[in-house]
Amino acid sequence: MEQDDFFKRDPFAQYIGAELLEVREGYAKARLLVDDRLVNGIGVCQGGALFTLADLTFAAAVNSHGQLSLTTNSNITYIRAVPKGYLYAEAHELVNHHRLPYGEVKLTDEAGRLCAVFSSSAYRKDSKY
Amino acid sequence: MEQDDFFKRDPFAQYIGAELLEVREGYAKARLLVDDRLVNGIGVCQGGALFTLADLTFAAAVNSHGQLSLTTNSNITYIRAVPKGYLYAEAHELVNHHRLPYGEVKLTDEAGRLCAVFSSSAYRKDSKY
Amino acid sequence: MEQDDFFKRDPFAQYIGAELLEVREGYAKARLLVDDRLVNGIGVCQGGALFTLADLTFAAAVNSHGQLSLTTNSNITYIRAVPKGYLYAEAHELVNHHRLPYGEVKLTDEAGRLCAVFSSSAYRKDSKY
Amino acid sequence: MEQDDFFKRDPFAQYIGAELLEVREGYAKARLLVDDRLVNGIGVCQGGALFTLADLTFAAAVNSHGQLSLTTNSNITYIRAVPKGYLYAEAHELVNHHRLPYGEVKLTDEAGRLCAVFSSSAYRKDSKY
């Protein structure tokens, strides 16, 4: 599967500017440029924009095997405010179950500091991605 | 506090088009028009856009008392795909704790069907909102 | 299905003393006597004992239709310490999906005060409960 | 702090038989013998017993600095059924924040297989543990 396939097919990913940097079986890495459009009322990356990058990166990782996998439940813990600049996400699929995969995503800022942790479950369908 | 105050101060809320419809002590209601910009690769509302509306509505509810409250942890369960059209969010602050408030948000589509449930904890600071 | 069936088949439920009070389609109510065995180092109900009652009550509710449903993911937020005495749990199945049910449980103490909220997803198998 | 201090002060930990094996700054390891008392209706470790071991081990890790830290929110994803025998838990405090620590716990069976993942936030008080 082409490396940038997943994000380029997703209009919202394009609208916020998320870029898929790397994807392989059970893994994905992406980034998002946090600028004036994506900040909240106190000038840091809005929590939903952060969550969206994590969600997209997780989806790229769990769909990496070619089987359509839809997110069912996600959890995010915010650790450090994300300033303007690049935000990075790295997703690892910890459980490659035929029906119920599970993965985690770490979000870091340009300085490499951990800003949030995200975990998610998905439901794997019989159809292809 | 003015009803539309919270969302209008938030650039990302403006960028996606989220509208705060009502807010009072411990409660907020909002909506988001899901259109071509906010859908995912299969044509329904992208999970992060849905989460963002829930997150903003929760934030409006917990900040309704005037004390700055920052989200620390959120959880979302997706129940039904959201088609293009309006998505509604209603947030209730179940625990109005001086330090650790907690609330839940129900997301429904134009037909009134439950599409997702969101819950979140926040940390209340000493500063004013 | 007999009202007390689910908890009486569960050894751990018996070991901690959890009692199923009521069950019907998509709903269950139970209680647990918090005594010297179930408290933590500061003398209030240990978080895991609280979680266990919620988990059992949720399981009773989602298995109420007769289809074996196994819990996949649960979330709990602690609101108020639970003193010795009875702890009550009420579970509502908000999504009766043929594969992915979802429910919430409210935990209250003898005085009726909300002590914790629990939410959970399950996976429904083809086999009967 | 003495290695077995935290679990031995906790009556419920003693009642289920949880043993703290190791603890140091921001880290703890423990185990639980899953026997006839701790299984559920289908003969594997009951979810609440599993959660309790994770919760206790997380608490030991976050309280390792000597500051009283109370769990506020926890999330658990079940991956594989735990058979009778030893269940192991390893907790890592990923965020040693003065007020809002966060950590994760991996649960494995005797064969070293990943059975569940647990994450949790806590609130750090001014008092000593």
Image (cartoon, coloured by chain):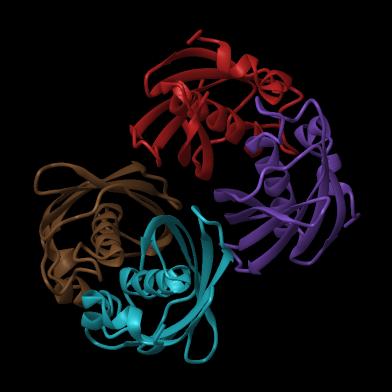
Chain colours: A brown, B cyan, C purple, D red
The number of callouts visible is 0
Q: Is the residue A8 above or below the residue D64 in the image? A: below
Residue A10 x %, y %: 21, 73
Q: Is residue A28 left or right of residue A125?
A: left
Q: Is residue A112 visible?
A: yes
The residue positioned farthest toward the top in the image shown: D2
Question: Which residue appears at 78% of the width and 25% of the height?
Answer: C37
Q: For residue D46, which quarter of the picture?
A: top right
Residue B114 x %, y %: 54, 78
Q: Is the residue B3 above or below the residue D3 in the image? A: below
Decide which of B1, D1 is in the foreground and name it: B1
Decide which of B54, C99 is in the foreground and name it: B54
Question: Which residue appears at 25% of the width and 74% of the height?
Answer: B41
Q: Is residue C73 left or right of residue B69?
A: right
Decide which of A38, C84 is in the foreground and name it: C84
Question: Which residue appears at 28% of the width and 79% of the height?
Answer: B39
Residue B37 x %, y %: 22, 83
Q: For residue D13, which quarter of the picture?
A: top right
The quarter of the rendered structure image containing the N terminus of chain C is bottom right
Residue C69 x %, y %: 65, 53
Decide which of D121, A41 is in the foreground and name it: A41
Q: Is residue B96 left or right of residue C88?
A: left
Q: For residue C45, which quarter of the picture?
A: top right
Q: Is residue D90 visible?
A: no
Question: Which residue appears at 36% of the width and 36% of the height?
Answer: D98
